[in-house]
Image (cartoon, rainbow, N blue to C red):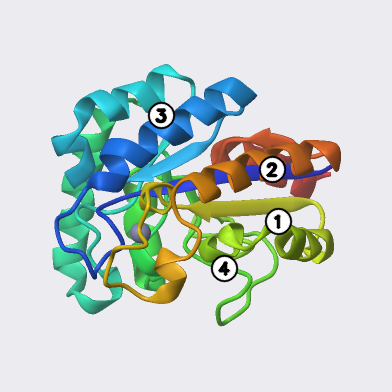
Amino acid sequence: MRIAVLSFDVEQDCPPYLGESYRGVEEGLPYILDILSQERVRATFFSTARVAERYPQLIRRIVDEGHELGCHSYAHERLDKLPGSTVASLLEKATAKLRRFTDQLTSFRAPNLKLPQSLLPVLHKLGYQVDSSIALYKPPFRAMPRVEYGIVRLPVTVTSSMLRLPWRIQKRIHDVLPRGLRIYFAHPWEYIDMSWARVRVDCRYNTGEAALELLRKLIGYLRGKGYTLVTISEAAQHVEASRQD
Ligand SMILES: [Zn+2]
């Protein structure tokens, strides 16, 4: 079965470079939600608790429109660089804040995909069932979904800036990625014009309108190839079911 997940990490603009700027959330996130609604796709939004404090109406919109809400830490802290006890209390606070919007908060992704293994039992205790803080393209290159400490770990398939390459180039990459389960991710700030920003070139390239058009193309491409677009929790259920076969 071909399953694809579109996921978005909802955070400040291009952390850690732009500090407390939230134009991506204010302008980019509504564009993404509009496209998903037009295309009838449900996605997963990993949000920081800070975004939920500042923009509760947008988090409500995510949930009301049938998307999955996941946790992306409190304020985009690097979880691998803080003491374990600090991280545990940050995650507890973030989880409580986000659960005000839904009792179905069971998926997690760490900022910069940096999740120390020691935090898996902490996540499990907080009621998380899915973690997507690993990637096919990062060491240790864990290509297969796996279950650790009761948590289904689903690797991200490609880095987000790849989804802003010109379609004729990007399509060739999609054509050769592993079939079966694909997990794509991007950020709201990629869907506003970042060409002005003093950030790395891969954070500025083809942002805004161009990125929105490419998102539409990706959805059409995946459907054309027979992929079903689901939330990350639903993908985890498929993985679990196939492991039991
Ligand atoms: Zn992030």
Give the mark toward the camera: 3 or 2.
2
Looking at the picture, tell me which residue is in the foreground, 128 or 74. Answer: 74
Q: Which residue is mark 4?
A: 135
Could you give the CA–CA distance between mark 3 and mark 4, rounded to whole angstroms? 24 Å
Q: Which residue is mark 1?
A: 167
Query: At 80% from the left edge and 51% from the top edge, which residue is drawn?
Result: 180
Q: Secondary structure at mark 3?
A: loop
Q: Earlier in the sequence, mark 3 or mark 4?
A: 3
Q: Which mark is on residue 217?
A: 2
Q: Are marks 2 and 1 in contact (CB under 8 Å)?
A: yes
Relative placement, left or right, of 123 versus 150 is left
Amino acid carrying label 3: it is Gln
Which quarter of the picture shows residue 196?
bottom left
Which residue is farthest top?
A: 64
Which residue is farthest bottom?
A: 139
Could you give the CA–CA distance between mark 3 and mark 2, rounded to whole angstroms? 30 Å
* Residue 115 image offset from top left, x and y in percent: 38, 68
Could you give the CA–CA distance between mark 2 and mark 1, rounded to whole angstroms? 8 Å
Q: Secondary structure at mark 4?
A: loop
